[in-house]
Amino acid sequence: MLVNLDWETLCARLQQHSGLDDVRAEIVNGPIVMSAMLGYLKPGAYHQALREKLASRISYKEFVDIWNGLLSANEDMTALVE
């Protein structure tokens, strides 16, 4: 894998902004996330749909900052790619 996906940290950070008991099922396997990953939802619509589903008031900027934390470079693959 070229990048690492840190679902645990992402879910923990979004959980802090949610009115739900557990956001993991929606974030990791939920239809809203899948729709966004397949390109069916534009960023603003994705934020709004997930915000409603998670009973959250998180701003778009904060959501993007948290979501971008999902990805990190896989340092073991860096040399191979270069």
Image (cartoon, rainbow, N blue to C red):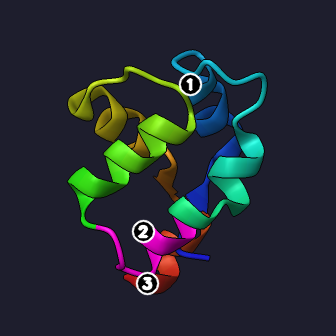
Question: In the rendered image, which quarter is residue 18 located in?
Answer: top right
Which element is circle 2 on? helix
Residue 67, position as x, y percentages in the image: 42, 43
Q: Type of residue at label 3?
A: Val
- Contact between marks 1 and 3 (CB within 8 A): the answer is no
Residue 31 x/y as whole percent: 61, 66
Residue sitting at x 48%, y 54% = 71
Nearer mark to the viewer, of 1 and 3: 1
Residue 79 pos. (x, y %) = 48, 75
Q: Gap between marks 2 and 1, in whole Å?
A: 19 Å
Q: Given this view, does label 3 or label 2 mark the residue nearer the observer?
A: 2
Q: What segment carries the magenta color?
A: 33-41
Type of amino acid under label 1: Arg
Mark 1 or 3, nearer chain start: 1
- Residue at 33% across, 44% down: 48
Which numbered tag is attached to residue 81?
3
Image-quadrant location for residue 60:
top left
Name which of mark 3 and mark 2 comes first in the sequence: 2
Q: Is residue 70 magenta?
A: no
Determine crowd level at label 1: few under 14, some 14-19, many 20+ residues with C-alpha closer than 10 A.
some
Circle 3: element type: helix
Is residue 36 part of the magenta span, yes or no?
yes
Q: Alpha carbon of mark 3 to alpha carbon of mark 2: how far?
A: 27 Å
Number of numbered labels in the structure image: 3
Q: Residue at x 68, y 49 (%)?
A: 26
Q: Which mark is residue 36?
A: 2
Rendered view: 55 above or below 35:
above
Quarter of the figure with the C terminus: bottom left
**Viewed as shown, does residue 14 lie left or right of 37?**
right
Report the residue marked by disc 1.
Answer: 13
Q: Residues within 10 Å of mark 2 (few under 14, many from 20)?
A: some
C-alpha distance separating marks 1 and 3: 31 Å
